[in-house]
Amino acid sequence: MPNYNKVMLMGNLTRDVELKHTAGNTAVANLGLAVNRRYRVNDESREETTFVDCEAWGRTAENISKFFSKGRPIFVEGRLKLDEWQDRDGNKRSKLRVVIENFEFVDSNGRGGGQGSNTQSRTPVPADDIPF
């Protein structure tokens, strides 16, 4: 049976990107994304927010860490990954997260640092080919 695991999300970072390195010096970035959904019920506008944990690896992780900070919009493409572990009490725990494979700047200025406009104009940039 064929399988397909693809996620595309656009939202705002809920916190600054946390960049770490593995023992083999591979960069890994952890970030939170807030994705809003606006809808109407009986002529009343409503909004719901979904919070998604994401991780990126290698140059993608380094570039996201370099160009993005809390509150900035980002478009990410990736795949779902299920993390499973046992807590201190021996209970099984699990959590879905998105492993980012590509990203795009959403700001009008194409930079992710600091506070700025949120114009939602997508500027495609291959995650591993940022010219810096």
Image (cartoon, helix red, strand yellow):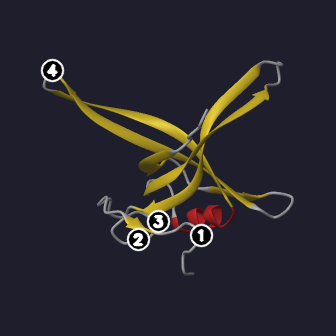
Question: Earlier along the polypeptide chain: callout 3 or callout 1?
Answer: 3
Q: Residue type at mark 1?
A: Asp
User: In the displayed image of the protein, which residue is found farthest to the bottom?
Assistant: 132
Residue 110 disc label:
2
- In front of the other: label 3 or label 1? 1
Q: Residue at x 54, y 75 (%)?
A: 130
SS at mark 4?
loop
Circles 3 and 4, Cβ within 8 Å, touching? The answer is: no
- Residue 36 picture location, percent across and down: 36, 40
Q: Residue type at mark 4?
A: Asn
SS at mark 3?
loop
- Residue 6 picture location, percent across and down: 52, 44
- In front of the other: label 1 or label 4? 1
Q: Residue type at mark 3?
A: Gly
- In front of the other: label 3 or label 4? 4
Whole-angstrom CA distance, mark 2 to mark 3, is 7 Å
